[in-house]
Amino acid sequence: MKETKMHSKSTRTLVSKVIIYLFIAIVMVLVMFPLVYTFFGSFKSNAELLTNAHKVLPEKFQTSNYANAWKSANFAQYTWNSLAMAVPIVIGTIFSLTTAAYVFERGHFPGKKLLFLIITSSMFISLGSLTLYPLFKIAKFFSINKSLWGVVIIRLLGINVTNLYVAKSYINSISTEIDDAAKIDGCSTFSIIVRIIFPLCKPSLFSVAIFAFMWNWDDFQNQLIYLTKVDLYTVALAMRTTIDATGADNWGAVMAMALCSVLPAIVMFFCLQKYFVDGVSTSGLKG
């Protein structure tokens, strides 16, 4: 009787695992299909894409779409512009958000809880359209509304609440005794942040870096407002321009550009996924 119950329980466990894994597999296929279709579509001719759109695999692989996208569409310049914009934003975000998270977690000043409540409450308000015009007027006043640095400065002056939570939660797991020992040794607050908090928060910093890079790499709205010159266009704007101008004539090149535009984010995530998982799901030193 006991063996029968154990066998029945193990059978139910096996069935539940099969159902869960089957569900995960279906979701994975649905999520990955657009990327897989774009990958194979980038090797198709425009005629094949229009006549045999229902087929995933191309009849004949051709790499000319990548050459056309890279040279004819000036994709190299757009990629450089995106990197020149995203990298400073990522570096500045890491430093500013970690500093802000340390202040909110370790600092003692009047109104700290109220200020943090106001900042976190912005998560429930769509600030994108509300702050778009005021930010543009400020940027125009300081004459930074027509350059890549204008986008960088505007993004750095904002606070991403999600990243702030990630950094603050990780700092919370670090023992305050480390701070006290550093102060006894004569470290200032800035030295504690740079020499102690930053090294200990490495997984959290990588998580913030991934979030910041992905959110700014494909940020279409802000780039559309501030970047008015074609030679300053980023990948996000170039994709839209290319589709409007030549999409009907060369969908293969458009798919090649689309695939190349997501590769930096994919490569960055896979290279840093170990730190990303540690930063989001684990804690640092325990006091």
Image: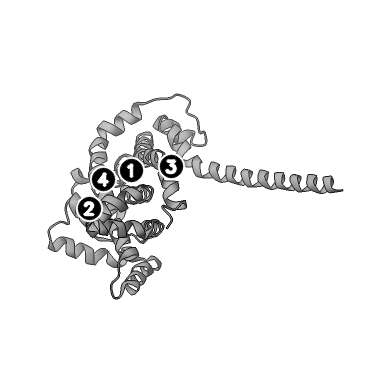
- Quick one: SS at disc 1? helix
Amino acid type shown at disc 4? Val
- Which numbered disc covers residue 152? 2
Badge 1 amino acid? Ile
Give the residue type that dot 3 points to: Lys
As drawn, the label of residue 243 is 1
Q: Are marks 2 and 1 in contact (CB under 8 Å)?
A: no
Which-is-in-front pick, marks 4 and 3?
3
Depth check, front residue: 255 or 175: 175
Q: CA distance from mark 2 to mark 4?
A: 9 Å
Camera-nearest label, 2 or 3: 3
In this view, the residue in front, 63 or 28, is: 28
Does label 1 or label 3 sit earlier along the sequence? Answer: 1
Q: Which amino acid does the dot numbered 2 rest on? A: Val
Classify mark 4: helix, strand or loop: helix
Q: Nearer the viewer, mark 1 or mark 4?
A: 4
